[in-house]
Structures are given as C-alpha cells and as structure tokens.
Image: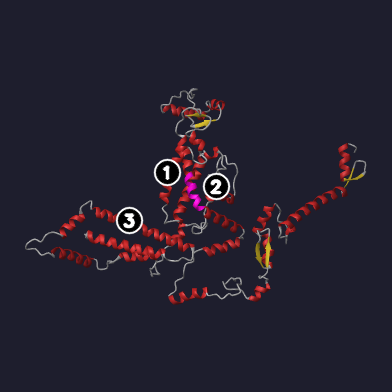
Amino acid sequence: MDSIIEVQRQTHEEIERFEAALSTILSRTHKTHKSHISAEHKASDILDRIVARSVYLQNAYDDIDGTRKAEIDVLSAPQIPGQNDLDEFYARMKKVQEYHTRYPNQVINGFDIELAGILGEEENDEIEEEDLINTLFSGEERYGLCLDLYTSHTQYNNLRHLPKRLQYLQYLDALAAVEDNSLHSELTKECKHSKEYENYVTGLYSYLLSFSKRTQPLLDIESLQRQAENEFETLWEEGKVPGWEAIVKTGGEEEGIWCPACQRHYAKQTVYDAHLSSKKHQKAAAKLEAEGSTMTNGTAKREEPHTNGAAKPSTTEPKNRNSARLTHLITGLLIPLIPTIAETKSNVERRFSLTAREREEELIDEAPAAAPPDPDGAAAEEEPEEEERIYNPLKLPLGWDGKPIPYWLYKLHGLGVEYRCEICSDFVYMGRKNFERHFQEARHAFGMRALGLPNTKHFHEITKIEDALALAEKLKKEGRKEISQNETTEEMEDEEGNVYNRKTYEDLKKQGLI
C-alpha cells in the first residue's frame, strides 16, 4: 500500500504540472479555427483532471477514514528502548524493492506519458489516434463556425396550425429575430400549445445546448442554464414570460369547456354536447369511471365541465409550462449565437451559388487527408515548406496543380479584365469566359428571380437592373402587339362563305348576325 503522504505530494505535483500544461496550451497561437477549438477542448480536459485531483486531495486532507492520521502517528511515534528509529523506513523500502523485483517492466512514471498525450508531444507514428474534433462536428457545422439546423427546420415546417412554411434561410432569419422579439412570435396560440411544438423546442434546445458545449468548452454552460431556469421561474410567477403572458395569467387555462374524460378543450357548448355521444368519449368515460371518476354511463354532468372561470386540472399547465420554459432557455442560447447564425446564412447562400462539381471539390478539400507513411522524416518536412513558398508576385490564379498559371495563358483568357454584374449584387467576374458562363449559374438566376424576371436568353449580356426591367417591359409590349396582329391577320369563314378577320368574325357572332 502506498503512503498517503506520498500520494498527496504526488497529487500536488500533478496539479502543478497540469497548470503549467494549461498555460502552455492557452499561450499558443492558432492559425485555423479547428486548431483553436482543439486547444480549448484540451484545456477543458486538463481543467477536469485538475478538479478531480483537487477533490481527491480535499477528501484526503479531511481524513474521514483516519488513514492519514494513522500514518502520521506511526512516523512520529516516540522512540522505544531497544528498537531502531529506522525500522519503519527499512520495512517500507523493502516493500518497494519487492514490488519492482516482481514487476521489472512496470512504467515508472505514467503521468509523463499522460501529459505528453494531452500536449500532443508524442512521436510514435505507428499509433495514430483518431482526431476527436472531426467526430464532434458534422460537415455542415464546419468545426463550429456554422449551425446544422436542417432537422429543426423540418420539424418546424411540420407543426400544426403553422401560418406559413419557411425556407431554410427564412427560418434562420426567424431564429435571429430573438434579439428583438420573443422566439417564434409569428406562431399562433394553437400552434404553440400543440404537442408537436413541444417536441420541436425540445429537439432544438438539445441541439443548441450540445453545440454551445462543443464550441465553448471553457464556458460553464450548465451554470448559465441554471440562472436562466431561475429567471424563468421568477417571470412565470409574475406572469411576464414573453409570448406566454395570457397562459400565465389564467394559470394555464385555455378558452372553452374542459372535458376531463377526453382531456381536451371545446370552444363551444354545442360542440361539447355533440362529442358526448361519440365512441371515443364513451371509451374514455368508461375508463375514467373505472378509475373512480364521477362520470357514469358515458355522459357528463352539466356542472362537471370546467369553463374559464372554474378550476381546471393541472394536466394542461405543465405542458404549456414546459414549452414556455424551453422557449425561454432557447432564447438565452440563441442570443450569443446570432453571429454564428449570420455566418450559417452566408455559407448557405454561398453553397447555393456553387455548381455540383464545385461542391464535390469543396468536400474533397475539406476532408481530412491522412498523411502517408514516409521513412525519411526530413524529406517529409521539407516538402510542405517548398509548397508554401510559391512565388506569385502578379497574383495569378492557381491551376489544377496548385501553382500559378502561365502569364501568357492569363492574358489569353483575359482573366485580368473585370466584369461587374449589378443583378448578382455587384459581383465581379474575372475574364470573359467566367462572365458569359455566370448567366446560367445559380447566383444570376437567384438575382433574376428576386427581380421577378425569367432567366431566358433574351436577358443574356444584361447586367444592370434598370436595363433588365426595361427589356422586360419591351418584351411585354411586343407580345401584346403580336397578339393584336394575329387577331387582325387571321381569317374566318361563315356558313355562307363570307370571309372576315378573326376579330370581326367574333364580334358578329356575339351579336348573332352570323
């Protein structure tokens, strides 16, 4: 058994070395967002280890089982006549020697290996640990730069009594509006009180909480959530929860008549009376009667329905309270994530403008590349340095090999000429080929749809909004003129063989003259 005093000393040493490692990690500069997130997760892991060892030290100093006091008494016992003072020391040294004789290959200091693994100082290339950061985030999240809310967006569009279905970009705008209004203030009361809405906010809250913990591992999210819970309790008691004031004031009461058997409200007395004869109500009433209810023979007494002024069972209040609580907590999580929502929206718009081939190339570029095994370590280190030192003073575009294209090819394709398109939000296209190709791409088509114009060949080479609107008006006038010409040039013949143009023929036929 190890000495409790030695274990405490070793624990103190580990805490100090963990603190030094934490300082080393936080003082490093990071070139990419991925490395920054990885460093924060390592720092969070070190903090958890420091807390665990501090708790162990506190329990050891409290000495609940008396182990530390017993060892101190043995070490500080007065000298006994005829006994050597170093007997206890030699006895313990003998145990240490026997242990190392029995386990000769035992790792002496495993803490150094543990600390090196955290700091990333291991040089063993044969054992490649899985990158945890790649498993924490999905491809859409881009290591915490964007949100992946497609699942929540689908649940939102499937809500009952939804006033209007939103596109994904509109849904992101609705979430970003919590800075000024309550969450989903556009939804109706019936929609917010449904079970589907509670399931929706539950899934959205779980995702946002998980995303906040993954992107901010050094922030105490749990304590912030407890503060938000306490704030919600206060607002709920005062009836000041944004968007739920009416429910709080009535104690969770809904308008209409309450049926205790069916556990739902009915807006009118006639609807309530009609449902009493339904099979569903009769089965529910029989089940309630079997449990000891006052309902008999599938009918309800007139004094049993709960109106707005009467007491109501508390089964509806927890449901609305839980939805209101989750909505309040989601609001607290969304406000710090508003810049992330804006970045998500920009990323979605950017991906809309990419072709299928460009998206595939982007996925290939973002995929983590596994380093091939190279026995010559020096050669492997020199290659990245050579690739980084690309001489490109003219800022030429890069070719398929990652190197600047020849200057003559740059001049041949006219890549130095700028073409600005006002319809594409003043986007600048370099080169005539890219400019001509962009008229059939998603960015230009999106701008034409925003103007309410079709993206046809008539509008090819049109880059200004004023010119596009003028051409559309001209095409409309030409279309009307062509229709009028068809009416005057097309000939029709009556039963007697008289020939008229189409307009005259239709006018005479309406008057009954032919």
Tell me: 104 left or right of 417. Answer: left
Residue occupying image coordinates x 42% and y 55%: 219
Q: Which residue is mark 1?
A: 230
Which amino acid type is shown beneath numbered disc 1? Asn
- The answer to the question of whether label 2 and label 1 lie on touching residues, with beta carbons closer than 8 A, is no
Quarter where residue 361 is shown: bottom right
Q: Secondary structure at mark 3?
A: helix
Is 168 located above or below residue 193 in the figure?
A: below
Which range of residues does the magenta coloring cover?
Answer: 328-337
Q: Is residue 336 magenta?
A: yes
Most frequent secondary structure within the magenta stretch = helix
Label 2 – label 1 distance at C-alpha: 22 Å
Which amino acid type is shown beneath numbered disc 3? Ala
Image depth: mark 3 or mark 2 in front: 2
Place of residue 68 in the rendered image (x, y in percent of width and height, measured from the top left): 21, 56
Mark 2: few, some, or many residues within 10 Å (few <14, many ≥20)?
Answer: few
Q: Which residue is mark 2?
A: 180
Query: Mark 3 or 2 closer to N-term?
Result: 3
